[in-house]
């Protein structure tokens, strides 16, 4: 099967690339903005035609949450209109679209893990454009699997883990929000989950939405403390409230995702967040 991956320079795209190097069952085509403009109908159609694409995994996204408040049109073009174009092209070519979405489609006012069927109510431009992308994909009628995830990190790119490790080198103490609760996700584990979905696609219901994060839920403060502990850093972490750390975009206070559905359909065992964090930090230390 020929598989197209968009956004291959991002955290998830890079992890998929590592796994694809060990996969002899499929032909992979990795693209990013420099090789495929996913907002161009002609470019996308040409790519599908030339490579006979059977599955498109869309990892491309506008993820600058605060900047999106000032650039709503750009965020919408990448997070909503581009997925719609990919979905329409998948429909034409009878291909499957696997699209990555976010916990930010929820408002964060809940107290129980969000199920895929729970009503969405995004509170930021980023969340709204991702929600719109989901809606537009569904409206095309193509075969799709939407996978919502959260708090993504890896050994590459910009993410919370690498930021904390960098700050620990220059600060004796830092302040981290302690009243926002969610689920960290190692990009490597998410990439494995997407491959599991890909390999089980004949047995999965199509036109479906799944949630995937690592097991367990914590606050950003808990996350920072664990990073310092596992990395052996002496930087003190002080808890603060969201109000004490003003940001342009609203963040969900509670965005824990329910993982029951993806575990039921795929049978996968999802690693606990701290176990995966330890592996990622070890990987980062090897690359220093």
Image: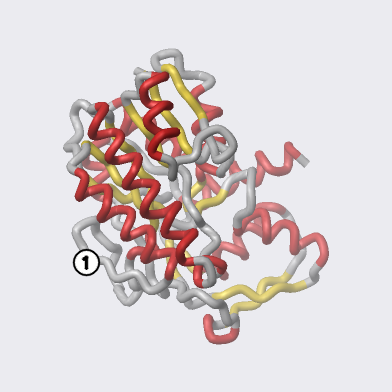
- Please tell me whether mark 1 sits on a helix, a strand or a loop: loop
Q: Give x and y (percent) for residue 234.
A: 77, 64
The answer to whether 98 is drawn above or below residue 22 in the figure is below
Toward the front, the furthest residue is 42
Q: In terms of image quadrants, where is residue 45?
A: top left
| Residue at point 18%, 42% (across, down) | 141
Is residue 217 shown above or below 19?
Answer: below
Residue at 21% of width from left, 63% of height from top? 118
Residue 188 in sight in this render: no
Q: In which quadrant is the C terminus drawn?
A: top right
Q: Nearer the viewer, residue 269 or 255?
A: 255
Q: Quadrant of the N terminus?
A: top left
Query: 233 or 171, which is in the foreground?
Result: 171
Q: Measuring 36% from the left and 48% from the top, which residue is drawn there?
A: 212
Q: Which residue is mark 1?
A: 119
- Horizontal and vertical percent position of residue 78: 45, 52
Residue 187 in the figure: left or right of residue 229: left
Q: Nearer the viewer, residue 101 or 183?
A: 101
Query: Residue extending furthest top?
Result: 24
Q: Is residue 226 visible to the viewer in this orientation of the structure? A: yes
Farthest residue in the right direction?
A: 170
């Amino acid at each position: 099967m020929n598989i197209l991956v968009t956004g291959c320079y991002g955290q998830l795209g890079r992890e998929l690339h590592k796994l694809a190097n060990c996969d002899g069952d499929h032909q992979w085509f990795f693209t990013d903005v420099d090789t495929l403009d996913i907002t161009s109908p002609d470019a996308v159609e040409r790519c599908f035609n030339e490579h006979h694409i059977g599955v498109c995994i869309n990892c491309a996204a506008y993820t600058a949450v605060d900047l999106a408040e000032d650039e709503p049109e750009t965020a919408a073009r990448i997070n909503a209109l581009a997925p719609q174009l990919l979905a329409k092209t998948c429909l034409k070519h009878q291909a499957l679209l696997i699209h990555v979405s976010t916990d930010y489609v929820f408002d964060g006012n809940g107290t129980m893990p969000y199920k895929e069927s729970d009503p969405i109510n995004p509170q930021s431009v980023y969340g709204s454009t991702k929600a719109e992308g989901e809606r537009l994909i569904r409206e095309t009628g193509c075969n799709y699997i939407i996978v919502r995830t959260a708090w993504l990190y890896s050994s590459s790119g910009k993410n919370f883990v690498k930021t904390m490790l960098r700050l620990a080198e220059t600060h004796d103490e830092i302040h981290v929000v302690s009243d926002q609760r969610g689920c960290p996700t190692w990009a490597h584990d998410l990439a494995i989950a997407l491959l599991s979905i890909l390999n089980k696609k004949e047995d999965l219901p199509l036109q479906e939405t799944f949630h995937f994060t690592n097991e367990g839920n914590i606050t950003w403060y808990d996350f920072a403390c664990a990073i310092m502990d596992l990395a052996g850093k002496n930087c003190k972490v002080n808890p603060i409230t969201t109000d004490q750390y003003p940001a342009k975009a609203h963040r969900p206070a509670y965005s824990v995702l329910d993982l029951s559905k993806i575990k039921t359909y795929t049978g996968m065992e999802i690693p606990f967040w701290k176990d995966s964090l330890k592996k990622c930090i070890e990987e980062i230390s090897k690359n220093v």
